[in-house]
Image (tube, coloured by chain):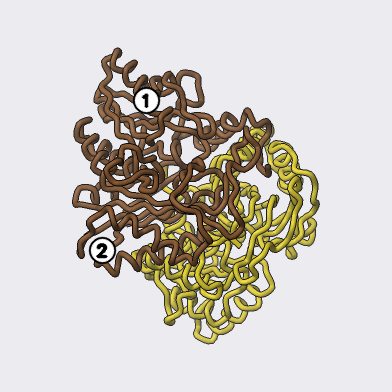
Chain colours: A yellow, B brown
Amino acid sequence: MKKFLNETENFVDEMLDGIYLAHPRQLTYVNDDKRCMVVTNRKSGKVGITTGGGSGHLPLFLGYVGDGMLDGAAVGGVFQSPSAEQMYEVTKAVDQGAGVLYIYGNYSGDIINFDMAAELADFDGIKVRQVVGNDDVASSVVGEEHKRRGVAGIFFVYKAAGAAAAEGLDLDEVTRLADKARLRTRTMGVALSSCIVPEIGHATFSIGEDEMEIGMGIHGENGISRKKLAPADAVVDEMMERIFAEQDYKSGDEVAVLVNGLGGTPKEELYILFRRVSQLFTERGVTAKHVWVGEYATSMEMAGASISVLHLDEELDRLIASPANTPFFCHTKI
Amino acid sequence: MKKFLNETENFVDEMLDGIYLAHPRQLTYVNDDKRCMVVTNRKSGKVGITTGGGSGHLPLFLGYVGDGMLDGAAVGGVFQSPSAEQMYEVTKAVDQGAGVLYIYGNYSGDIINFDMAAELADFDGIKVRQVVGNDDVASSVVGEEHKRRGVAGIFFVYKAAGAAAAEGLDLDEVTRLADKARLRTRTMGVALSSCIVPEIGHATFSIGEDEMEIGMGIHGENGISRKKLAPADAVVDEMMERIFAEQDYKSGDEVAVLVNGLGGTPKEELYILFRRVSQLFTERGVTAKHVWVGEYATSMEMAGASISVLHLDEELDRLIASPANTPFFCHTKI
């Protein structure tokens, strides 16, 4: 295991030390627990938005805590859910009287703990809504979308909800818009190599030197098919075929696209993938209006990529375009 | 070789296609050559700043072309210098009558070609100045700094010069400030694994499963020592010892710090490294006022990291703090 770390059991807490030391003006924590992260400047009267999930996916999840995005995040161990208590503490800290929206990925541990946190918050009179990201097309068939995992596409849900809350919309409206972004987002991923969880110390799975796995999850969950690594354009074509099959794009439509590296893949290659994504949309008369290419939801050092597409409409376009500023993500009007 | 690519000979040009397709409002090219990149909105009367160098280091070099940073970049093949002709074309395009500053790394191919481009520009009456980044402490001893390679610390030179030009300062003043940032920047790197150049198809060098190489260059140039991988804090201590030896930090001083991933190292680990960097400065009474942690100068998929430190003074602090916005880098006042 070639990693920069001290004792493996301190991996997450030392990472958090580093984050708070690097970004003291933007991030802090509550309840004397570094895993209960909140923004330093909570805005009075605004709907609070929190997330949570396992570590090992930076900038997911905590990297989106900041202006125009999220107000807090509960941080778990590597690939582990944070506790209900931690989520509850974050909830109390970010609530400004307008209620709190939870946005997180569709994993059983997170669901159980966020549900419990919502109940605890309810006792305190804090209104809580939940939107559970399930954008990973590979993880279940059409008709069983509720079984799908949440992966990189949750970025668009954060962005839309964060902008809506920053505009001063109320909890019902922020929730409606987050849910609309969720319903209109699809992601497909492909893995080329495994990640290594520090506490385990060896590769989560093995994959041949000439193989790729289409549809693999961000913790190494099984994908749809393992096959010989194909040229980049053919890989994109196969991934996009499944996204096109589920979204009814018409000529003149607009989309937001996120080509996301899983950790070990150079940005150069991600742009080669985007080139083909762009060609496929252009062929259909669809405009990729907002584009992000880089690392937005990783699996430690896993080589691979995912493509997320948000089918825009007028109000989603407005929310995706609006500015945001976190220590890990910055977006300004161009 | 597990890479997302089509034909290896098209790697750089398809990457550039992807970049122009992703960021059409910010980036374009001149002379009908995609390797001659310039910003779309060149500001009249402003000193132009250009860079250039080999591909495979994203976001270096072209990723810093944008508002508040650079006006153009000549793009070479993977780890290869662009041509003098390409640098000259970029120079002509960015010159707005106030002259052009070249900022690039200390590699012989780049020096030869930038010198030739400067001569061609001189025939056209374009004033050109040059600042050659040489921040890599590991690549030569004190007293022979002119032999040192330019690595991630060039980021600070771009940032300072870009801000100075955006303020409307003249060519001599922008050059003075860029050179001051250069002289006050030091970098140390450590590699854990090799990169793979697409056209070559196999690892540039081999390194044992439990080894690291302190001081390795970003093309795999030899470092200072190869040894058993140590705990993260010990690695940082060894790297920072050489930086501290060359910069006279006094209690009350301020620095800007860049903890840079070389491509394959997760952000989580970079923050563990920064934690220790921060501790070492705090022990000395020095404040890390501006901090960036992430990938700023890579070597394709190489695992490893570098630490760059800029010793601030009042005017460098002002320039480093000022806003910038490129497709790969965004900085706003917090």
Q: Residue at x 54, y 54 (%)?
A: B192
Image: B12 above or below A64: above
Q: Nearer the viewer, residue A283 or B113?
A: B113
Crowding at dot 2, Cα within 10 Å, few <14 / some 14-19 / many 20+, comes out as: some
User: Which element type, helix, strand or loop, lies under badge 1?
Assistant: helix
Q: Residue at x 36, y 23 (%)?
A: B91
Image: B225 above or below B53: below
What label sits on residue B286 in the rendered view?
2
Residue A252 seen in this snapshot: no
Circle 2/circle 1 CB separation < 8 Å: no
Residue A173, image x, y percentages: 53, 63
Q: Residue at x 32, y 55 (%)?
A: B243
- Report the amino acid beneath label 1: Phe
Can marks 2 and 1 be said to lie on one chain?
Answer: yes
Image: A127 above or below B297: below
Q: Label 2, label 1: how many angstroms apart (C-alpha)? A: 37 Å
Image-based side of A240 in relation to A165, left or right: right
What label sits on residue A179 in the rendered view?
none
Residue B148 seen in this snapshot: yes
Residue A76, image x, y percentages: 56, 73
Image-based side of A80 in relation to A239, left or right: left
Q: Nearer the viewer, residue A210 or B224?
A: B224
Residue A144, image x, y percentages: 78, 62
Residue B161, image x, y percentages: 28, 39
Q: Nearer the viewer, residue B225 or B153?
A: B225
Q: Residue at x 73, y 64 (%)?
A: A146
- Report the amino acid beneath label 2: Val
- The residue indicated by pointer 1 is B114
